[in-house]
């Protein structure tokens, strides 16, 4: 598939402090992740996919950083039910076949088309869908107004303007998983990617 897309990525994991993977460190146990792709502009095989929301939830297979991009994890993929039939035709295989470096779900447990909502109040973002929910706020830096950022991250090739967040909570129940976390790591970043 030929594709290109720009948008915003919202992500939370199970780490209480900032995720070790952003610092190329191993973890004590495999992590879990809840991610929203807000596609602002994009095309997949010449089909316009701008304006679509997609959530992926990953249960990583390994706690080792070296395994992150090669092994990933298993989980569900949730595509906004607002997607047209033509958009669904390209979005499902695009996310299921795991474009390298973009998603952590290497073993897809299932794809569901659901109602996904993203709302913002000041610097707080609330994401809901029938099988999960996440609420996160940008973490203000030393100047008291601008968000803290990760500079020169190892993920800078895929993500830009990586802003640190406090995830007030995130929860998920589907495909045999039942998780609920409070005060965890989170980020919001821009992506501008293409391939094919």
Image (cartoon, grey):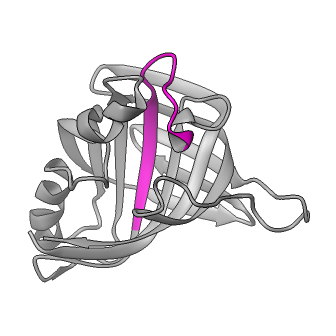
Q: Nearer the viewer, residue 26 or 146?
A: 26
With respect to residue 112, does 175 lie above or below? above
With respect to residue 189, does 78 lie above or below? above
Q: Is residue 21 left or right of residue 72?
A: right
- Quarter of image, res 115: bottom left
- Rendering coords of residue 94 (x, y %): 16, 59
- Rendering coords of residue 140 (x, y %): 81, 58
**Residue at the image point whose x is 43% and y is 54% from the top:** 36
Q: Is 31 included in the stretch rendered in magenta? A: yes
Question: Which region is colored magenta?
Answer: 23-38
**Residue at the image point whose x is 32% and y is 32% from the top:** 67
Point out the image quarter for the C terminus. bottom left
Figure disc tally: 0
Q: Is 134 included in the stretch rendered in magenta? A: no
**Residue at the image point whose x is 30% and y is 53% from the top:** 101
Q: Is residue 96 left or right of residue 121?
A: left
């Amino acid at each position: 598939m030929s594709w290109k897309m720009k948008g915003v990525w919202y992500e939370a994991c199970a780490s209480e402090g900032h995720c070790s993977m952003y610092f190329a460190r191993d973890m004590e146990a495999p992590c879990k992740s809840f991610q929203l792709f807000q596609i602002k502009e994009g095309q997949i095989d010449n089909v316009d996919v701008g304006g679509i929301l997609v959530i992926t939830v990953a249960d990583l297979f390994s706690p080792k950083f070296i395994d992150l991009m090669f092994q990933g994890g298993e989980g569900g993929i949730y595509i906004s039910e607002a997607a047209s039939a033509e958009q669904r035709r390209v979005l499902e295989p695009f996310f299921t076949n795991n474009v390298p470096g973009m998603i952590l779900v290497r073993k897809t447990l299932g794809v569901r088309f659901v109602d996904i909502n993203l709302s913002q109040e000041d610097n707080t973002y609330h994401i809901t869908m029938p099988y999960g929910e996440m609420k996160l706020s940008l973490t203000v830096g030393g100047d008291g107004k601008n968000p803290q950022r990760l500079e020169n991250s190892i993920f800078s090739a895929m993500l830009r303007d990586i802003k640190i967040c406090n995830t007030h909570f995130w929860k998920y129940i589907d495909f045999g998983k039942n998780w609920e976390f409070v005060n965890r790591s989170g980020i919001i970043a821009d992506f501008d990617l293409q391939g094919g």
